[in-house]
Image: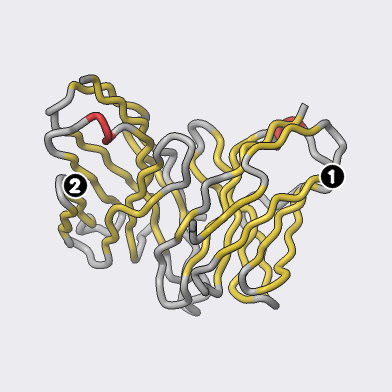
Amino acid sequence: GQQLNQSPQSMFIQEGEDVSMNCTSSSIFNTWLWYKQDPGEGPVLLIALYKAGELTSNGRLTAQFGITRKDSFLNISASIPSDVGIYFCAGQFLNAGGTSYGKLTFGQGTILTVHP
Amino acid sequence: DADVTQTPRNRITKTGKRIMLECSQTKGHDRMYWYRQDPGLGLRLIYYSFDVKDINKGEISDGYSVSRQAQAKFSLSLESAIPNQTALYFCATSDYFQETQYFGPGTRLLVL
């Protein structure tokens, strides 16, 4: 099955710094998603990417779908304390019959700590 | 009110006990999922259901079973709980046309 490697596993940064994290896959994905999980809650979708090369922003967040379709990155600019949490990448692979539609493969997560 | 709810939010049980985790959604989605989250392993799919009559195993279904009682309800059961099933469990839903999944708040399970 598809495997996703997400890095780094954790980051400790100062407020105001920029953050970058990425995911790589051994297989091609048709869709890349980035989720954030706040402490004690379920993951919430931040950005969805549907096309190779696509670059999408959501406020201070920017994500890109890699040209090879095997990777994606997420950048957070000018971090603030509420950016603290676990960030997950997720990919969807569509098989020939489309039966994998809706099934996601998740990365291991990046734990982000922001010091004021 | 939350769109996806899970009960209980926390549960402590003993090895060998049968327990059920419940998920309800008001989003009107056909598709529902159960995931397990362990530190450093991300979210792993246990079971998923694309409609009331469709149940499928995920990557780690051993030791678990599910029931889709209605479009809005999807339950996860541990027939005989064991300590390595201690984890955070999430339910999620999605629409047929969307790959975006919406997660519940999670159930923290401790098996002693």
Which residue is under mark 2? Answer: A61
- Chain ID, mark 1: B
Image position, residue A11 (x, y; %): 29, 26
User: Residue farthest to the right?
Assistant: B16
* Viewer-proximal residue among B111 and A99: B111
Q: Amino acid at mark 2?
A: Leu
Question: What residue appears at the point 12 percent right and 28 percent down from the top-left corner?
Answer: A16
Q: Which mark is residue B18?
A: 1
Q: Position of residue B88 (x, y in %)?
A: 59, 39
Residue A70 rendering spot, x and y as whole percentages: 31, 54
Query: Which of B102/A110 is in front?
Result: B102
Q: Secondary structure at mark 2?
A: strand
Depth order, front residue of A65/A84: A84
Other-residue count near label 1 (Cα within 10 Å), few / some / many at <14 / 14–19 / ≥20: few
- Is A57 left or right of B90, judged from the image as shown? left
**Marks 1 and 2, Cα distance to the nearest angstrom?**
43 Å
Residue A92, position as x, y percentages in the image: 41, 62
Name the residue at 67% across, 45% down. Answer: B8
The reply, left or right, for residue B1 in relation to residue A82 is right
Badge 2: chain ID? A
